[in-house]
Image (cartoon, grey):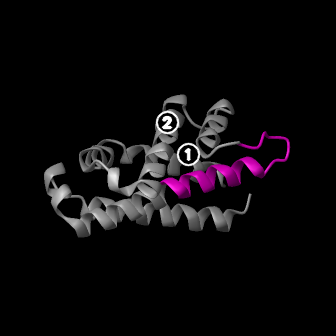
Amino acid sequence: MDEQLVGQKLDSLRRCLRRIESWLPETANELAENVDAQDIISLNLTRAIQLCVDLAAHYLVDDARRPVPQTMGQTFQLLAEEGLIKQSLADNLTRAVGFRNIMIHDYERVNWAIVHALCTERLPDFKDYAKVLFRHSD
């Protein structure tokens, strides 16, 4: 595994999470009214999710004997099958990929209350994921 690449992606992931935390308003209503916060949070949230997928794919393709994921969400399921991450974390990250797809492909339908809940309740998933991958990149 390319430790330098993994380190760069983990640093980018941490930066995205810090940006989300620093721009997240106290309430979902405040987020729904703050276009700047919406833009910064949605960009960094989609980047964070994509970085998680990229890191998983990088880990999985490091060994040609591993199956190649057919979908972005499947990358996390394969990591769970290998015991690298817990199944509950894989499920949460898989759902995040579905949310990322809405953010990118159907932005007009974004429910800012869901975004706010995701940012207040699920950011620890991204942090836990980064910790696990950091330990495995040594």
Residue nearest the observer in this picture, 103 or 95: 103
- Can residue 92 be seen in the rendering of this structure? yes
Residue visible at 48% across and 43% down?
Answer: 98
Q: In this view, does 59 lie above or below 41?
A: above
Please tell me whether mark 2 or mark 1 is closer to you in this view.
2
- As drawn, the label of residue 132 is 1
* Residue type (three-letter) at the residue carrying disc 2: Leu
Give, as a single range, the part of the protein colored magenta. 49-69
Left or right, 62 with reference to 49: right
Q: Residues within 10 Å of mark 2 (few under 14, many from 20)?
A: some
* Residue type (three-letter) at the residue carrying disc 1: Val
User: Where on the picture, by quarter, is residue 7?
Assistant: bottom right
- The picture places residue 29, in percent across and down from the top left corner, at 14, 51
Residue 66 inside the magenta-drawn segment: yes
Residue visible at 37% across and 48% down?
Answer: 123
- As drawn, the label of residue 89 is 2
- As drawn, the label of residue 94 is none
Left or right, 60 with reference to 121: right
Residue 136 inside the magenta-drawn segment: no
- Can residue 27 be seen in the rendering of this structure? no
Which part of the image, by quadrant, shows the N terminus?
bottom right
Most common SS among magenta residues: helix
Of callouts 2 and 1, which one flags the residue occurring earlier in the amino acid sequence?
Answer: 2
Residue nearest the observer in this picture, 37 or 32: 32
